[in-house]
Image (cartoon, helix red, strand yellow):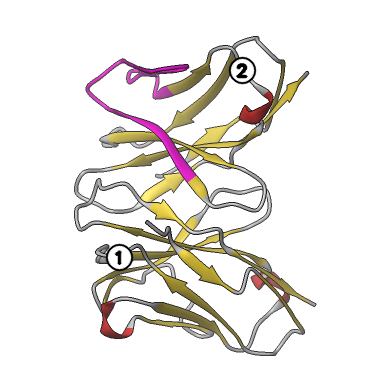
Amino acid sequence: GEDVEQSLFLSVREGDSSVINCTYTDSSSTYLYWYKQEPGAGLQLLTYIFSNMDMKQDQRLTVLLNKKDKHLSLRIADTQTGDSAIYFCAEGRDSSYKLIFGSGTRLLVRP
Amino acid sequence: EAGVVQSPRYKIIEKKQPVAFWCNPISGHNTLYWYRQNLGQGPELLIRYENEEAVDDSQLPKDRFSAERLKGVDSTLKIQPAELGDSAVYLCASSQGTPMAEQFFGPGTRLTVL
């Protein structure tokens, strides 16, 4: 079955690192994505990782993938107040356009 | 370059009334998606278009929902009649024509059914 799960809420202090976790169930997933949604806005793609990779780094963002455990994480270094938003992980397969989204993790960055 | 444009941004209607949402995708994007995002949830796909053809409408409640994409550019999503449970944000996204192409999302239309 298709199911993507995330913790609901994360609060960190400005300047600290944030780690947002996600688990998925579909072992045939080819791509895994992280999207950011700010209030009143649509989703913005932050980064993605192919399922044959275990890590991807993009400036302050680090994505770790444990394919055996079907666990995906997003680490944001030096978290800023502007990073406060809802973060969604999503899985997709190269044969399908369909993305399966998690319920989102609300990140609150305290000054 | 303009992003995905949606209107209206907000809509409040009484149950049993009809409602329509409009989407203008990014120029050159032949794939268009309509998603529904319930409060506290991630988006769920309702329908996907390739040009003017609806190629995946398996999640669209066809008894009350309809969509069209005339000329393969703009699209409208309609609900008739609306029910209380239809309150949600309706997101439109577009992408270039490959499965893993990035989907660009519009800001959505927040529908409240009273």
Q: Is residue A80 left or right of residue B78?
A: right
Of badges 2 and 1, nearer the viewer stands 1
Q: Which mark is residue A79?
A: 2
**Residue type for callout 2:** Thr
Mark 2, other Cα within 10 Å: few <14 / some 14–19 / many ≥20: many
**Residue type for callout 1:** Ser
* Of residues B54 and A70, the one drawn nearer to the viewer in this rendering: B54
Q: Is residue B75 left or right of residue B21?
A: left
Task: Point out residue B87 in the picture as x, y percentages from the top left corner.
Answer: 68, 69
| Quarter residue B76 falls in | bottom left
Q: Secondary structure at mark 2?
A: loop
Subunit of label 1? B
Task: Point out residue B97 in the picture as x, y percentages from the top left corner.
Answer: 20, 58
| Residue range of the region highlighted in magenta in the rendering | A44-71
Task: Point out residue B58 in the picture as x, y percentages from the top left corner.
Answer: 37, 69
* Of residues B8 and A56, the one drawn nearer to the viewer in this rendering: B8
Q: Which mark is residue B27?
A: 1
| Location of residue A76 with respect to A25 vertically, above or below | above
